[in-house]
Amino acid sequence: MKTSAIKLVSAVWLLMLATVAFAGGPEDYDYILQKYVKGDFMDYAALVKNKDDRQRLDAFLDWQAKADAAQMSRDDRIAFYINAYNSANIKAIVENYPVHSPIDIPGYFDKLTFKVAGEDLTINQIEYDKLIAGHKDMRAHFAVVCSDRGCLPLRGVAWKGKSLHADLETVSKQFVNDPRQFKIDYDKKEVWISKIFEWYGKKFTEDPDRPAAKPELFVMPYVDEKAKTLLASGDYTLRIIEWNWTLNEKLDR
């Protein structure tokens, strides 16, 4: 009798654990990032092979679909849409894996839709309409990761409103210290900058909290004094770093 009771309690406990594990929420997305972000890359192959973790990702996406973004604070809402953008990219790659580049997937940015806070949104709409047009914080461009090596690496944790400003400042500094995003050839007086400054151009001059006379001057708060002096002088040639569309995949598996 005691043995049967113990088995019953154990079975109920395991069922409760399973229910909690996939209840849906930011903690499920945190789990995915902590487990599958490997340095600068994402281990999509391992995630594709793990049915339980794919279900965990789907549980987060279901929670995200039903969330009420309008009731969130500004910082919570920005963090919410950064997570929505990045998780949509992960989901799209997992659903189409293996793939060499996200742009090999038809309609990747402007046709595939994801339910976010009750709306069907493309990846472009999450970034343009919800993050940039909706909040005008251009640092968000450094936080969103479109599953390729042109972007900064994914963070190993979800974005959170309570630490949003500090975390956006961190990725902005990370951006200017990454030669794949920003570099200066002082001998030639050439400033090399990410293609996002060509794509979004004037938008980088319209951030109300970080005004910049020219798009590339948006980086001024994050560069060293030598770089500031050159940028302030205007005596340089602006060059664009071409985008690397290769999947941000962990290959040494």
Image (spheres, rainbow, N blue to C red):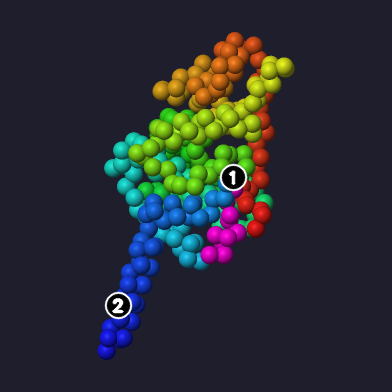
Q: Residue at x 50, y 26 (%)?
A: 203
Q: Position of residue 22 (x, y in %)?
A: 39, 62
Say which quarter of the image contains residue 109.
top right
Say which quarter of the image contains residue 194.
top right
Residue that numbered label 2 is attached to: 9
The quadrant of the picture occupied by the N terminus is bottom left
Q: Position of residue 90 (x, y in %)?
A: 53, 52
Q: Position of residue 59 (x, y in %)?
A: 41, 59
**Residue 180 appears in the rendering:** yes
Q: Does the magenta portion include 48?
A: yes
Vertical arrangement, residue 132 with respect to residue 184, above or below = below
Q: Residue at x 59, y 18 (%)?
A: 227
Of 12 and 29, the residue lying toward us: 12
Q: Main secondary structure of the magenta part?
A: helix
Residues shaded magenta: 41-50
Residue at disc 2, secondary structure: helix
User: Dot 1, how many residues are within 10 Å of its Cα: few (below 14), some (14-19), or many (20+)?
Assistant: some
| Left or right relative to 145: residue 104 | right
| Left or right relative to 196: residue 16 | left
- The total number of labels drawn is 2
**Residue 147 appears in the rendering:** no
Disc assigned to residue 40: 1
Q: Does the magenta portion include 205?
A: no
Q: Position of residue 205 (x, y in %)?
A: 49, 21
Q: Residue at x 31, y 75 (%)?
A: 12
Disc 2 or 1, which lies upstream in sequence?
Answer: 2
Disc assigned to residue 106: none
Of 182 and 252, the residue lying toward us: 252
Q: Residue at x 34, y 50 (%)?
A: 67
- Report, in whole angstroms, how far the alpha carbon at label 2 lies from the one at label 1: 43 Å
